[in-house]
Amino acid sequence: MPKINSKVEDVIMARIKAEEITMKPKWYFVMGSVFMLLGLVSLTIGSIFLTNLTLFLLKQHGPMGQWRLETLLNSFSWWIPVLTVLGMTVGVVMLRKYDFSYRKNLTIIVVGFIASIVVSAFLIDYLGLNKIWSQHGPMKKFYQQLENKNMAPGRRQNGSGRFRNRP
Amino acid sequence: MLYIKLTKMTDEEIIRQVQKGDKEIYARIVKRYQDKLIRYATYLVGDYHLASDVIQETFIKAYVNLNGFNIKRKFSSWIYRIAHNEAMNLLKKDKKQFSLGEHVEIDSNIDLEENLIKKELKAQTQRCLKQMSVIYREPLSLYFLEDKTYEEISDILRIPVGTVGTRINRAKVIMKKICQK
């Protein structure tokens, strides 16, 4: 029958004294925490932006002010909602790394995280920030490209930012 | 003199000293925890020798990551958590069903035997534990055999305190069924 003994202690202390095993420096853990926080914040901001972009594109109407489902399905930039979902998923995985995540109800944390992203996206839409971004500043070109891709061929925007008539 | 001083020091105080560069006194931590952790790992992996390897790796990982330990938190929960992770990694690697060996000697130096009822419960728990699934085996062994509180178990297993309670209650029912067979 094996008996518990102190061999573990001897082996470990011998390896520590021989410097075979060394402690990782404090800055390694500080940097880890900083990168983790930055990653989470970036993912949250990215997810808010992409959710808002999805809303913005969904609000593009076809001729006669009606939805054109077929056009929407054919030309919609599906990578945006896919990337949004991916961002949210990675965000939830990162949130779970934090100590508070297992002390609280995980469902509430996940729902809260997703809800805050969606609400923020709606808020940006409500305040009209996406319209401002699509008409001015460095994001203008990006928005116009997406708008053009998403519209029915007859309503594509010309270079001056105006819609041209259907032929 | 130094020995007396060391025995009076809390785990967290010792860790602070090790972090400052006094490597030698890490031996005190190993001495304090090795038997408890080997016993705990034996409950999980079911083999004394495997458990010893798991715990050796646990102490190495704990030492390497010692600067990442927050002194304000409880060291015992932190090291049990590392032991838990190491044991789970081993269980995942070797998917064959581990069970508690018939000839495993459990170290009983700790003051758990004072209460006769608890002793009987402990012996019964050890017999029945081997037949339980690991998700119930873990909280039950930590609660009854390692004398951990719900909060400590929550920190070790990283599950909510409510879930700890639920699992322990379910484990008791399962154990009752198993033991009464």
Image: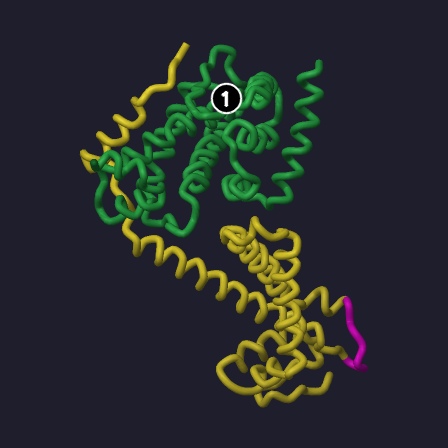
Chain colours: A yellow, B green
Residue B103 is left or right of residue B59, and the answer is: right
**Residue in the image at 21% along x and 37% along y:** B2
Residue B126 seen:
no
Residue at figure coordinates x 72%, y 64% from the top left: A73
Name which residue lies at 32% across and 46% down: B13
Label 1 belongs to which residue? B113
A122 or A148: nearer the viewer: A122
Which of these two is toward me, B34 or A98? B34
Amino acid, disc 1: Glu
Question: Where is A50 relative to B108, above or below?
Answer: below
Q: At x 66% / y 71%, what residue is drawn?
A: A119
Q: Position of residue A10 (x, y in %)?
A: 26, 26
The answer to whether residue A64 of the structure is visible from this angle is yes
How many numbered marks appear? 1
Helix, strand or loop under label 1: helix
Q: Is A4 displayed left or right of B143 in the figure?
A: left
Please state the chain letter of the residue tagged with numbered disc 1 in the rendered image. B
Which image quadrant for residue B176? top right
Which corner quadrant holds the N terminus of chain A?
top left
- The magenta stretch spans residue B57: no
- Residue numbers of the magenta segment: A63-69
Using the image as rendered, state which of residue B57 and residue B116 is in the foreground.
Answer: B116
Which of the pair B28/B42 is nearer the observer?
B28
- Percent across and percent down for residue A102 are 56, 49
Q: Quadrant of residue B32?
A: top left
Label 1: few (<14), some (14–19) or many (≥20) C-alpha neighbours in 10 Å: few
Considering only vertical position in the picture, is B154 above or below B87? Answer: below
Residue furthest left as drawn: A18
Q: Position of residue B67 (x, y in %)?
A: 32, 49
- In the image, B18: left or right of A156? left
Q: Position of residue A150 (x, y in %)?
A: 66, 73
